[in-house]
Amino acid sequence: MKRITFLVAVATVTGVIAFAAPASRHADQEAAPIFVKTIPPGYRDWRLISVAREEGDLNDIRAILGNDVAIKAYRGAKLPFPEGTIIARLAWSHDASEENNKTFGRPQSFVAGVHKNGVQFMVKDSKKYASTGGWGFAHFDDGKPADEVVLSTCFGCRQAVKERDLVFTRYAP
Amino acid sequence: MKRITFLVAVATVTGVIAFAAPASRHADQEAAPIFVKTIPPGYRDWRLISVAREEGDLNDIRAILGNDVAIKAYRGAKLPFPEGTIIARLAWSHDASEENNKTFGRPQSFVAGVHKNGVQFMVKDSKKYASTGGWGFAHFDDGKPADEVVLSTCFGCRQAVKERDLVFTRYAP
């Protein structure tokens, strides 16, 4: 159950969703790259797309960043996202801040703590990732790419936002 | 009570805290600029320092961004913050995402909605803002600077983080 929750999590707010092809294409999939194996360099310097909070088992606070191509596309409401778009999802523990609460005089303040739930990316390359809607997906824990199984079992999820080119996160102005 | 809460809020997690001089310096204060009256241009393009969540009356989700000087100082753990440092605090409504929750199968997902609780800045200029620890403070609602009273009544707050040059927000790696 926990595993399923995590998979759905990967497939949702994260901005990096598994998007496996239908079962009938499974043989082709094995030959075609679907998953990004290296962490895009410099992503921590990218600009902010939005922020989010996940309760439940994930229990984190997150930021979604975009490279220049992504930010330009978001601001111009350009869909589908152009080639070279990369969207990153970072997450941290959602920690109560005793320091802040002391000043507020009541418990209400939460800040980003340690890294949590990995870092995720979706990379637009329509040729390379033709079988998955033009998006390559990645999830890294401590710099190591996640098992492909984690990313390959959530075909349905991003269909919910097909009209937004499979991207859940909206731009926060 | 609500007003007090707001003032404390301004003074806390925001990264932009009112820091009035002691009462005895009040006459000097009126001559010296303490408050930033114009919005620093291009701040939405700045890099991410951290994210945070305020419950209670504020009820928002926020991002703290920094200009290049700020980011360099944070990453180098350089204190006090150098001249030219600017830290921005943006906040949005903390909105449940029905779209995401549908995918998760349970209510757990929150995203940034509309702008909320203004945008705030702290600007380091040791000469210009000598009477307030070298920091100039600003709060804008819909582009309009807040009443100085809002920013001038929270002397005690940032003293809590005097050892971090009056800045509450820590860098999220």
Image (cartoon, coloured by chain):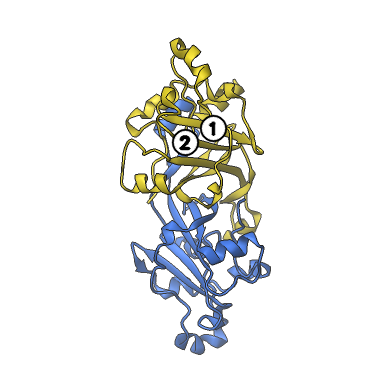
Chain colours: A blue, B yellow
> Horizontal and vertical percent for residue A134?
56, 77
Q: On the rendered image, what quadrant is the N terminus of chain B found in? A: top right
- Residue B14 in view: no
Q: Amino acid at mark 2?
A: Val
> Horizontal and vertical percent for residue A150?
45, 70
- Judge by depth and name the residue closer to the eye, B59 or A75: A75
Residue at position x 43%, y 15% from top?
Answer: B22
Disc on res. B132: none
Is disc 2 surrounded by few (<14), some (14 to 19) or many (20+) residues within 10 Å?
many
Disc on res. B123: 2
> Horizontal and vertical percent for residue A14?
52, 60
C-alpha distance separating marks 1 and 2: 8 Å
Residue at position x 59%, y 72% from top?
Answer: A82
Mark 1: secondary structure: loop
Is disc 1 surrounded by few (<14), some (14 to 19) or many (20+) residues within 10 Å?
many
- Residue A139 in view: yes
Q: Amino acid at mark 1?
A: Val
Up the image or down, B100 lies above or below A134; here it is above
- Is disc 1 in contact with disc 2, using a CB cutoff of under 8 Å? yes
Residue at position x 50%, y 41% from top?
Answer: B88
- Which comes before the other along the chain, label 1 or label 2? 1
Give the chain letter at badge 2: B
Q: Would you name the residue on which mark 1 appears?
A: B36
Up the image or down, B60 lies above or below A87; here it is above
Give the chain letter at badge 1: B
Up the image or down, A173 lies above or below A149; here it is above
Give the left or right position of residue A24, taking residue A34 as reference.
Answer: right
- Judge by depth and name the residue closer to the eye, B112 or B101: B112
- Judge by depth and name the residue closer to the eye, B51 or B126: B126
Give the left or right position of residue A155, taking residue B87 as reference.
Answer: right
Give the left or right position of residue B83, taking residue B88 as reference.
Answer: left
